[in-house]
């Protein structure tokens, strides 16, 4: 499996504090069946983004793990004005493995009115935004039409493995299942921070997908789509988004089709 959202690198954010804690988290990922992982420290007002340090600690951990897991680099990019402007100037700086895909996280205070334009500007810069864990964001749970619009316009959506297993409560579990059934979700990721208080849960997340939605969906969200993201490839065909997604003015050949193909679910 691929996990493209994990706070693995020690001493950089609210993830592991020590090298030993990072190695323990990596070992937990290996035991979950994860073969490729993206270390994604926060880039926010609270935590500065340190590319050189990120590379050094990634290399240090990969060496200590003797090649048993491949570690890529990205970040959990908070949608602040400064970060967005930096990303527009250097589209690869925050991206996963310096490709086209980038994790974006909303501030807890809400969704700014200009967010549609912000995401559009990122796409114009060649970035494919991946909206992280919207099932844990109250503003999107209460007004999910925003999320549907962004999916229609070409953004991707990542839900947390622990949400599917009830680790973030019944509301997050139920809304995740609903959005997956509607074809709004493109990948599962751990957002792991610690073996003790935020473990990976990828194995259990895959099992929950397999049980409720079948092997095709489980593989698509845990292997095929995140694999394309890790290696910066075009996304494979995706199910047609359903439910409250409004039809694009450009129809079936709109923006979403230009990023990846569609198929009936």
Image: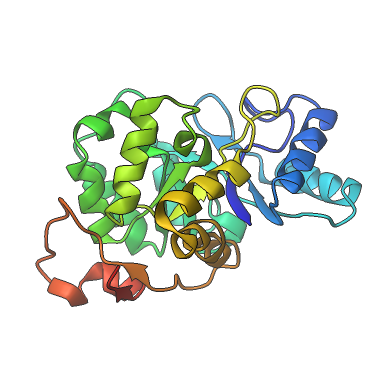
Q: Identify whether 215 is placed above or below 174.
A: below
Task: Pick whichever, 139 or 170, lies toward us.
Answer: 170
Instruction: Locate the C terminus and report the quarter of the image it occupies.
Output: bottom left
Q: Is residue 72 visible?
A: no
Q: Position of residue 135 (x, y in %)?
A: 36, 36
Q: Identify whether 236 is placed above or below 24.
A: below
Instruction: Locate the N terminus and report the quarter of the image it occupies.
Output: bottom right
Q: Quadrant of residue 259?
A: bottom left
Residue extending farthest front: 211
Q: Is residue 34 visible?
A: yes
Task: Pick whichever, 173 or 7, lies toward us.
Answer: 173
User: In the drawing, does residue 117 fall left or right of residue 45?
Assistant: left
Q: Position of residue 120 (x, y in %)?
A: 27, 55
Q: How many marks?
A: 0
Q: Position of residue 158 (x, y in %)?
A: 43, 48
Seen at 9% across and 67% down, the residue is: 249
User: In the drawing, does residue 166 fall left or right of residue 243?
Assistant: right
Q: Identify whether 52 is placed above or below 186.
A: above
Q: Quadrant of residue 15?
A: top right
Seen at 31% across and 57% down, the residue is: 183
Question: What is the image's colouring?
Answer: rainbow
Q: Position of residue 234 (x, y in %)?
A: 46, 73
Seen at 42% across and 39% down, the residue is: 133
Seen at 79% across and 41% down, the residue is: 27
């Amino acid at each position: 499996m691929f996990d493209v959202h994990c706070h693995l690198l020690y001493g950089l954010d609210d993830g592991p504090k020590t090298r030993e804690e990072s190695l323990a988290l990596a070992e937990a990922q290996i035991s979950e069946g994860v073969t490729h992982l993206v270390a994604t420290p926060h880039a926010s007002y609270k935590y500065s983004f340190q590319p050189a340090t990120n590379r050094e600690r990634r290399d240090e951990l990969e060496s200590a793990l003797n090649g048993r897991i491949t570690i890529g680099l990205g970040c959990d990019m908070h949608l602040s004005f400064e970060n967005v402007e930096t990303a527009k100037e250097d589209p690869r700086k925050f991206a996963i493995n310096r490709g086209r895909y980038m994790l974006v996280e909303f501030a807890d205070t809400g969704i700014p009115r200009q967010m549609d334009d912000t995401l559009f500007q990122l796409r114009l810069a060649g970035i494919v935004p991946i909206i992280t864990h919207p099932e844990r964001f109250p503003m999107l749970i209460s007004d999910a039409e925003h999320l549907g619009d962004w999916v229609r316009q070409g953004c991707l959506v990542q839900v947390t493995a622990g949400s599917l297993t009830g680790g973030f409560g019944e509301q997050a579990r139920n809304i995740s299942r609903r959005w997956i059934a509607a074809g709004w979700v493109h990948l599962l990721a751990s957002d792991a921070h610690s073996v003790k208080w935020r473990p990976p849960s990828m194995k259990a997340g895959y099992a929950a997908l397999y049980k409720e939605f079948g092997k095709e969906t489980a593989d698509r969200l845990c292997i095929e789509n995140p694999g394309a993201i890790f290696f910066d490839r075009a996304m494979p065909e995706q199910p047609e988004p359903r439910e409250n997604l409004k039809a694009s003015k450009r129809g079936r050949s709109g923006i979403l089709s230009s990023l990846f193909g569609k198929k009936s679910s």
